[in-house]
């Protein structure tokens, strides 16, 4: 990864660090969070442990999905995730600090739009997955209603979405 990519990722993560409490409160009573969580919980494939969430943020998905470990570059959300009993590591998805074939399940939930190098992150997820493991992607399609709504927020310079790519 180039230095410019790392700086860009740090810039993207800065808002989540600075406004972690506000971001976390957004999930309280959020119909969207409930819908996204229900969609992931409805997967018919058994998802084995150990489980990792890349882009764990404040740990709400990780807690609900019984994910043991989460990584995120923003420090303040990791502190919140720790209160939800998620073991956390400050790291970027482009350089996951785990050995090959370390996890049976890796979650990348509604995070792709914030990544500097999404293909590299997916490659790292593949590297750390055990044979027969599962990568669970939660995506916001750009052409869908939610993608268009978030794009509109980006265009209005919303702090969480100004650097997102749909």
Image (tube, rainbow, N blue to C red):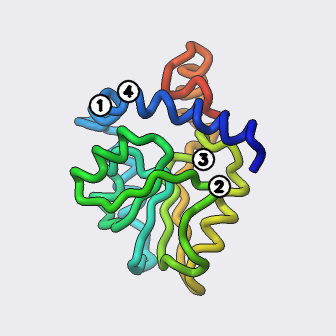
Is disc 2 surrounded by few (<14), some (14 to 19) or many (20+) residues within 10 Å? many
Is disc 4 surrounded by few (<14), some (14 to 19) or many (20+) residues within 10 Å? some
Q: Secondary structure at mark 2?
A: helix
* Residue at mark 1 to residue at mark 2: CA–CA distance: 25 Å
Residue at the extreme top: 156
Q: Which residue is mark 2?
A: 94
Q: Is residue 108 visible?
A: yes
The mark that comes first in sequence, 3 or 1, is 1
Circles 1 and 2 in contact, beta carbons < 8 Å? no
Mark closer to the observer (3, 2): 2
Mark closer to the observer (3, 1): 1
* Residue at mark 3 to residue at mark 2: CA–CA distance: 12 Å
Residue at the extreme front: 3
Q: Secondary structure at mark 1?
A: helix
Circles 1 and 4 in contact, beta carbons < 8 Å? yes
Circles 2 and 4 in contact, beta carbons < 8 Å? no
* Residue at mark 1 to residue at mark 4: CA–CA distance: 6 Å
> Is residue 20 found left or right of 11 in the rendered image?
left
Q: Is residue 10 above or below residue 19?
A: below
* Position in image of residue 79 (x %, y %): 30, 45
The mark that comes first in sequence, 2 or 4, is 4
Q: Which residue is mark 4?
A: 19
The mark that comes first in sequence, 3 or 2, is 2
* Residue at mark 4 to residue at mark 3: CA–CA distance: 20 Å
The mark that comes first in sequence, 4 or 3, is 4
Q: Which mark is residue 21?
A: 1
* Residue at mark 3 to residue at mark 1: CA–CA distance: 22 Å
The mark that comes first in sequence, 1 or 2, is 1
Q: Secondary structure at mark 3?
A: helix
């Amino acid at each position: 990864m180039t230095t410019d990519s790392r700086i860009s990722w740090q810039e993207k993560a800065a808002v989540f660090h600075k406004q972690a409490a506000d971001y976390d409160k957004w999930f309280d009573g959020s119909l969207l969070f409930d819908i996204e969580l229900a969609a992931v919980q409805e997967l018919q494939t058994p998802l084995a442990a150990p489980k990792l969430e890349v882009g764990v943020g404040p740990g709400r998905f990780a807690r609900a999905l019984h994910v043991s470990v989460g990584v995120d570059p923003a420090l303040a959300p990791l502190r919140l995730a720790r209160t939800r009993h998620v073991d956390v590591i400050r790291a970027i998805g482009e350089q996951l600090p785990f050995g090959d074939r370390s996890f049976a399940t890796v979650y990348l939930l509604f995070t792709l739009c914030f990544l500097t190098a999404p293909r590299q992150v997916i490659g790292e997820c593949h590297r750390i997955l055990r044979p027969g493991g599962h990568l669970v992607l939660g995506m916001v399609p750009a052409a869908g209603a939610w993608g268009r709504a978030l794009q509109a927020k980006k265009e209005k310079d919303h702090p969480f979405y100004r650097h997102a790519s749909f």
